[in-house]
Image (cartoon, rainbow, N blue to C red):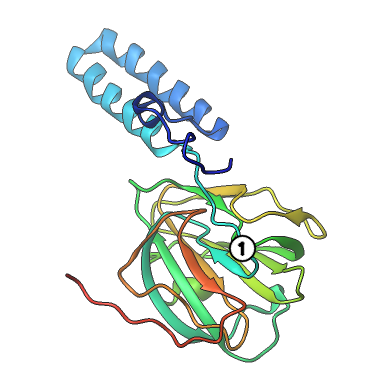
Amino acid sequence: MTSGPDSSPSALDTVLVPIHRAGWPFIGAFAAVAVVLGFLWTPLFWICLVATAWCVFFFRDPPRVTPLGEGLVVSPADGRVQMITEAVPPEELELGEAALTRISIFLNVFDVHINRVPVDGRVIAQAYRPGTFVNAALDKASDENERQLVGLETPAGQRLGLVQIAGLVARRIVCNLEAGQSVRAGERYGLIRFGSRVDVYLPAGVAPLVVVGQRAIGGETVLADLTSQGPQRTGEVR
């Protein structure tokens, strides 16, 4: 959608957030268990009802306003910028063997887990790699954990890497992209259940516009500008 003076969401819109279709089987299962156990022991019903409510919360899919502009790289996920480092991208991304700037965004179990495409362009590579389920906040999770890898190319020919990484609780990565597919910045492309991390590999010479510790909003927060030659930003807690 396009933001404008008359397009602000109503109070009701902010409360009645849509639920991603992948969540309904889980919500239904939690609710059914709550009813069954409620016949056995009433306190179990209330415990399971709380679990059902959390499941609804986890699979929420709020609309986002994506900034439009040539070269803008928006965050693929909600979460905290957990690290920014130089790392050699996985070979499946087809980004070469030189180290690139990698922005890692960590999602806890309370974050929105719908993932969004960071740039306009097309999918040039797509691969799945099985692995372990260590804490996604650890640096080694990029190399050891189960992950889904996507290489993207912008209309200007610049290439980026996108990696969904499972974590301690996450056991299912959903990616709806295919090689050759055209994509738009901010559109939904998948999710990770439950708690995870997403890595973004920027093209050589592109500095991030976010800093470690900053909260990112999927589809809205600008991670980098591919047309800018500015230095990497710094920040402090205030």
Position of 15 relative to 108 (above/below): above
Identify the amino acid type marked 1: Gly
Residue 87 lies, in percent from the top left, at 52, 85
**Along the line of sight, the residue nearer the viewer: 203 or 70:** 70
Residue at the image position 79 percent from the left and 60 percent from the top = 179
Position of 45 relative to 157 (above/below): above
Residue 37 lies, in percent from the top left, at 30, 15
Name the residue carrying label 1: 69
The quarter of the picture where the C terminus appears is: bottom left
Residue at the image position 54 percent from the left and 48 percent from the top = 191
Decide if residue 222 is on the left or right side of residue 203: left
Decide if residue 49 is on the left or right side of residue 184: left
Decide if residue 20 is on the left or right side of residue 93: left
Decide if residue 127 is on the left or right side of residue 67: right
Q: Name the quadrant containing residue 93.
A: bottom right
Residue at the image position 44 percent from the left and 26 percent from the top = 27
Q: Name the quadrant containing residue 129.
A: bottom right
Total marks in image: 1
The extreme bottom residue here reads 98
Q: Name the quadrant containing residue 47.
A: top left
Residue 235 lies, in percent from the top left, at 29, 78
The quarter of the picture where the N terminus appears is: top right
**Along the line of sight, the residue nearer the viewer: 55 or 167:** 55
Residue at the image position 49 percent from the left and 65 percent from the top = 222
Secondary structure category for the residue under label 1: loop
Position of 158 relative to 122 (above/below): below
Task: Report if residue 144 is visible in the image.
Answer: no
**Along the line of sight, the residue nearer the viewer: 148 or 215:** 215
